[in-house]
Amino acid sequence: MAPIFSLQYSEYGDFLYAPIGEEKNGMVLTALSALARIELDPWQEAARLALLPTEVAKGRLASIISGLPNGCWARSDAGTIAARLIALLPAPKASQALSRGTTRGNRSLSYRVAVFAFFVVLNIAVFVVFRSHEPAPAIDDGNHATSTTNTPPDVPMFGSK
């Protein structure tokens, strides 16, 4: 499935629109284009990189850059390019709001699941209670005759003796 992108303002804009370098066809490749080409959502990846310790983020981005085809940069330059780009990411404090929002969303889902489970258990309990209060069916011990057909009683008709 192709990633869905947003063109709204983003705190990651400086990073995403920064050039990685020139490609063999003469076009400038940005971080946004590079991440999209490898089917990563550029904004999500930028947020992920911003949360990582700087050295880890540089290593991750350098690995991505070194794997890109058609670049006019040496693979050995991937670390330098990554360091320049990672410096453009916002401070981790700004990015943590995104992760807190995601955690809050997960808590909301857990709450909804708990409420749903509570109502399922409540319904089962009500069913069991009502079921246990139904009168027991009559037990046929064979001491009296029972009829399986419903025949009306013999009642004299009007005018007959």
Image: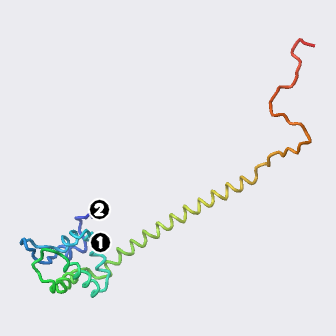
Q: Amino acid at mark 2?
A: Met
Query: Which of the pair 85/153 is nearer the observer?
Result: 153
Name the residue at 22% across, 72% down. Answer: 35
30 sits left or right of 51 in the view: left
- Crowding at dot 1, Cα within 10 Å, few <14 / some 14-19 / many 20+, comes out as few
Determine which quarter of the picture holds residue 50.
bottom left
Q: Nearer the viewer, mark 2 or mark 1?
A: 2
Callout 2–callout 1 Cβ contact below 8 Å: no
* Disc 2 secondary structure class: loop
Query: Which of the pair 113/91 is nearer the observer?
Result: 113
The residue that disc 2 covers is: 1
Q: Is residue 55 above or below residue 112?
A: below
Query: Which of the pair 41/100 is nearer the observer?
Result: 41
Q: How is the image coloured?
A: rainbow
Task: Please provide percent x and percent y for residue 79.
Answer: 19, 86
- Residue at the outermost left position: 26
Determine which quarter of the picture holds residue 45.
bottom left
Badge number at residue 44:
1
Badge number at residue 72:
none
Q: Is residue 63 above or below residue 25?
A: below
Q: Is residue 27 above or below residue 55?
A: above
126 sits left or right of 118 in the view: right
- Residue at the outermost top position: 159
Mark 2 or mark 1: whose residue is earlier in sequence: 2
Task: Please provide percent x and percent y for residue 122.
Answer: 63, 59
* Disc 1 secondary structure class: helix
Determine which quarter of the picture holds residue 73.
bottom left
Q: CA distance from mark 2 to mark 1?
A: 15 Å
Instruction: Tally the marks.
Output: 2
Task: Please provide percent x and percent y for residue 60.
Answer: 26, 81
Q: Amino acid at mark 1?
A: Gln
- Residue at the outermost bottom position: 55
